[in-house]
């Protein structure tokens, strides 16, 4: 049973249908063209040891809808003691969970995946409300991919020995996971599914500004009857994350977020026997050659930078286009950008929703101003923006040089910078002229050129004649300041096991 810890009343509800069973104050979010509603509690506790508990601090904070600036719900602020309780719960649950057969663990993961699919609409609406991204994306990308991660990893749970031939894979132990706000549910699924498949237990901290779908996922865990303590969710701010990574009983830390915080975490675990994987920022090059199918490339470039308002670590934020087609390509892009529909994220026709927070909006504005000040040429189509909420027009800079801040720093917003190249060698050189190395894209008609360029680009993912396509079977991760370790695929599971030689006795 899910329970809130509202001081005035303690509403209970059946975790599996999201309906109020008695008492409590509820608000309902209505999705367009829909007759049913998504129930949201006034206040959420922490999910520790399979129960909803009050934060020891007694403190709560609001999570708001970035498209309206209205409060959606209050969420608990976990402190060091709450984090400790969550880690102890995960530690207590570990022996029984790791002892389960892979087949039994798979059953839980399959169950979670199926329930997520059944409750897909509810998750899509909730994610759109809490994050600001369009319902079209939460419905077609975030939620289905989150379910896919549970399905995919369920499939490996009883086959880990095949994955690591000649070795005896064992769980690492208690894992602390910290995720960002740009794909809240999907990042939770990316982190939790492989950890559970390999027999680990988890304490996860969602981002302060987008905690609701991770909390709703706890209801799915309850519904799937996942044993208590196998996954614990502690909400809070950066101090909650800092307390988690410093906890002495963790065996592994997995972090997705900014390079800056990634570096802090690296320091916090230094000298301790804690495994670490970091998925950090990016500044992807998107290369368009003159022989590419230009109209398709326009679609790819638009998807590459304006998907999820550009709040994407692997966004194709640096378009580097062959000089001979630059003017034509830019004209095509401008026409296409003028057709991007920006507005109400709950409207299924919306292409670009709200910027996630006022803080992020300020950052985008600041970097765009630096582009103007440094002499790049800004294009923004005419676009009516809603009065309330946080919004930014799809934007493109031309005449960008490698030294401009907009070319070097991650904007994490709907802002494309365009520069040119003449030869493939120059394209590769410019693409690699970055401190990051997460992703890249190549548009060309020539297969041999794809292979030539792709093998020379230092990025974890190189998309060819497509962009921003994700699959649970495909490893994701970076080089340099984009972090280390992979998530997804067989490589992703490697981070959640310790290997012992199966040939040794014992
Ligand atoms: P962030 O500020 O680094 O926050 C990420 C998470 O870390 C949040 O849960 C945050 O809590 C927490 N945190 C903050 N300070 C911490 C500390 N000292 N110790 C431990 N945890 C701490 O990043 P963000 O602004 O949420 O997300 C944007 C960044 O994430 C971008 O740079 C983007 O490129 C990167 N990202 C990378 C990937 C990838 O797979 N490589 C995917 C998505 C995003 P609060 O929310 O309370 O601050
Ligand atoms: Mg929010």
Image: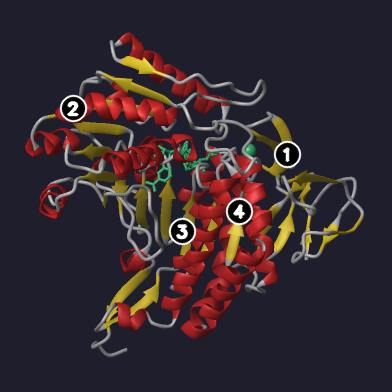
Side of 94 relative to 320 (left or right): right
- Which of pointers 3 and 1 lies earlier in the amino acid sequence? 1
SS category of the residue bearing label 2: strand
Vertical relation: 54 (above or below) 301: below
Q: Is mark 1 within 8 Å of ligand 2?
A: yes
Checking the image for residue 420, the label placed there is 2
Q: Residue at x 30, y 36 (%)?
A: 283
Mark 2 and mark 3: span between their CA atoms?
36 Å
First in sequence: mark 2 or mark 1?
1
Determine the CA span between mark 3 and mark 1. Answer: 25 Å
Q: Which residue is mark 4?
A: 214
Query: Between tags 2 and 1, which lies in front?
Result: 2
At which x and y percent is residue 354? 57, 32
Is residue 208 visible to us here?
A: yes
Instruction: Locate residue 196, reporting x and y percent.
Output: 49, 70
**Label 2: few (<14), some (14–19) or many (≥20) C-alpha neighbours in 10 Å:** many
Instruction: Identify residue for label 3.
Output: 190
Residue 33: x percent and y percent? 73, 48
What's the distance in space between the residues labelled 2 and 1, CA to CA? 45 Å
52 shown above or below 352: below
First in residue order: circle 4 vs circle 2:
4
236 on left or right of 153: right
Cα distance in 3D space between marks 4 and 3? 12 Å
Q: Residue at x 75, y 64 (%)?
A: 15
In primary-sequence order, the first of circles 1 and 4 is 1
The answer to whether marks 4 and 3 mark residues whose Cβ atoms lie closer than 8 Å is no
Name above or below for residue 68 compared with residue 428: above
Disc number for residue 72: 1
Q: Position of residue 476 (x, y in %)?
A: 34, 55
User: Mark 4 and mark 2: span between their CA atoms?
Assistant: 42 Å
């Amino acid at each position: 049973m899910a329970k809130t810890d509202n001081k005035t009343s303690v509403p209970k509800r059946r975790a599996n249908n999201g309906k109020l069973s008695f008492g409590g104050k509820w608000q309902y979010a209505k999705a367009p063209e829909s007759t049913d509603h998504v129930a949201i509690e006034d206040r959420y506790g922490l999910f520790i040891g399979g129960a909803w508990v009050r934060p020891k601090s007694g403190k709560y904070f609001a999570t708001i809808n970035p498209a309206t600036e209205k409060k959606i719900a209050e969420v608990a602020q976990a402190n060091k003691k709450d984090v400790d309780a969550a880690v102890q719960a995960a530690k207590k649950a570990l022996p029984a969970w790791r002892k389960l057969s892979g087949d039994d663990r798979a059953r839980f993961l399959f169950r979670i995946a199926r329930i997520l699919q059944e409750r897909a609409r509810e998750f899509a609406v909730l994610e759109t409300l809490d994050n600001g991204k369009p319902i079209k994306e939460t419905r077609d990308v975030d939620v289905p991919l989150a379910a896919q991660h549970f399905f995919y990893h369920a499939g490996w749970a009883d086959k880990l020995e095949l994955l690591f031939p000649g070795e005896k894979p064992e769980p690492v132990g208690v894992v602390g996971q910290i995720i960002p706000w740009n794909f809240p549910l999907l990042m939770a699924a990316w982190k939790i599914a492989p950890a559970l498949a390999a027999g680990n237990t988890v304490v996860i901290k969602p981002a302060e500004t987008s905690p609701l779908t991770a909390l709703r996922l706890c209801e799915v865990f309850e519904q799937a009857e996942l044993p208590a303590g196998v996954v614990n969710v502690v909400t809070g701010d950066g101090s909650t994350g800092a307390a988690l990574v410093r906890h002495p009983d963790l065996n592994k830390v997995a972090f997705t977020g900014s390079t800056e915080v990634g570096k802090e975490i690296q320091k916090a675990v230094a000298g301790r026997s804690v495994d670490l994987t970091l998925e950090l920022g990016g500044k992807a090059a998107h290369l368009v050659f003159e022989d590419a199918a230009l109209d398709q490339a326009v679609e790819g470039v638009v998807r590459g930078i304006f998907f999820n308002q550009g709040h994407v670590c692997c966004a194709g934020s640096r378009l580097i286009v062959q000089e001979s087609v630059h003017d034509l390509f830019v004209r095509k892009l401008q026409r296409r950008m003028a057709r991007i529909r920006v507005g109400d994220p709950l409207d299924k026709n919306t292409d670009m929703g709200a910027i996630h927070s006022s803080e992020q909006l300020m950052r985008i504005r600041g970097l765009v101003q630096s582009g103007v000040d440094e002499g790049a040429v800004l294009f923004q189509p005419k676009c009516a923006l809603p009065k309330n909420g946080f919004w930014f027009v799809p934007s493109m800079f031309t005449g960008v040089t490698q030294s401009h801040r907009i070319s070097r720093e991650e904007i994490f917003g709907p802002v494309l910078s365009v520069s040119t190249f003449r030869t493939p060698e120059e394209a590769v050189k410019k693409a690699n002229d970055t401190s990051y190395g997460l992703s890249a894209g190549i548009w060309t008609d020539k297969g041999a050129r794809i292979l030539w360029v792709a093998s020379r680009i230092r990025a974890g993912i190189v998309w060819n004649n497509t962009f921003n396509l994700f699959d649970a079977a495909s490893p994701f991760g970076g080089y340099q300041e984009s972090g280390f370790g992979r998530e997804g695929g067989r490589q992703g599971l490697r981070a959640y096991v310790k290997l012992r030689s199966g040939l040794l006795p014992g």
